[in-house]
Amino acid sequence: MNQQHHYPYKYKRHVFDDKEVFYQHLWKKIFPSQYSEGYGANERSYSDSNKFVEAFIAAHIAEQPKETIASYLKLAHQFCQAHFRLLLNPNVDLVLELDGHKIAATGKKMLDYMAVSNWHKAFCLALVLRDNEALIGTLCRFQPENYINPKVEDLPIDYPYCKFLQGLFAPNADLQVLVQEIAKLSAPEYMPERRQSFIYNIRLPFIELIITVLARDENRYHQGIEKALIANKNHFSIDSRKSIAEGWLPMHICAAAAMAYDQCGFKLPFASPYLPEWLIYGDFEH
């Protein structure tokens, strides 16, 4: 397959330099006081997590040391988990460990950033970082039907999709039934055309990869990796999406590949600029 990356900028540090300056010279100065005084933990932790995801991906593109890349990934995970812990524990006083600071905050149920797409990002971060406590203790408690936001477009496929991924950590889950429901609700009539590319090129290839891991089918897994990379590039390389950092390092493929390696010993079928092997094989300090 064509392994040329679709990163749209000529200068590899184009995005990373901005993220690094923001973190080192602005973020570290404003973050502790804003969060400690209660202005940011509930309202900002998810959006700040997104900034760290972008910094992590930009660091990978800029070929930074893996310690630098991993540090941004861990920050993204910390802030994303803080978001879900706060929203899943209303009226509970919590102490959040964020970027080396202990932040006291009280949980509060909100609907912002609680769609299945937000949960999916948190799930992939936890999976690739091998954080079973976050996966089981926090993310498997999420019930999407309790966080329906009238401002956000819901898709019928969201619910079995979420339940299937949670079912990976629930011994009694009927995964076959959930897969059948996902297949049914992935038909075009169940979603607007503008959402179909994301579902068909990102969500479904991720599920298909997970299924190959559950079946311990290495040949299908290798085929699935290639198909998922092609699908990711098809979705993100068009002009309106090529500057979206999530397409430059597909976390859903990395997460499935990490699961495949940890559970089955499956390795990637080929090297790819989209997939950091040290991340997938857990060759870093978790």
Image (tube, rainbow, N blue to C red):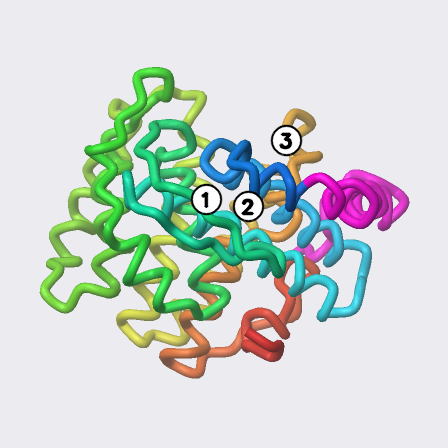
* Label 1 SS: helix
Q: Nearer the viewer, residue 31 or 242?
A: 31
Quadrant, the N terminus: bottom right
- The residue type indicated by label 3 comes to Arg
Residue 18 located within the stretch drawn in magenta: yes
Q: Mark 3 sits on what residue?
A: 241
Q: In the rendered image, which residue does mark 1 sit on?
A: 202
Q: Earlier in the sequence, mark 3 or mark 2?
A: 2
Taking 271 as reference, is 201 above or below it? above
Where residue 166 sits, quadrant-wise, is bottom left
Q: Do the residues labelled 1 and 2 touch (CB within 8 Å)?
A: yes
Q: Residue at x 36, y 35 (%)?
A: 114
Q: Mark 2 points at which residue?
A: 232
Residue located 26% across and 36% down the image: 157
**Span of residues in magenta:** 1-30
Residue 276 to residue 196: above or below: below
Instruction: Decide which of tag 3 and tag 1 comes sooner along the chain.
Output: 1
Q: Position of residue 248 (x, y in %)?
A: 66, 48
In the drawing, does residue 105 fall left or right of residue 10?
left
Measured in 3D between alpha carbons, the distance from the residue under mark 3 to the one under mark 1, in whole angstroms, is: 13 Å
- Which amino acid does the dot numbered 2 rest on? Asn
Question: Which of the 4 image quarters holds residue 37?
Answer: top right
Crowding at label 1, few (<14), some or many (≥20) Cα neighbours within 10 Å?
Answer: many
Q: Does 24 lie within the magenta span?
A: yes
Q: Are marks 3 and 2 in contact (CB under 8 Å)?
A: no
Q: Point out residue 89 in the picture as x, y percentages from the top left corner.
A: 28, 45
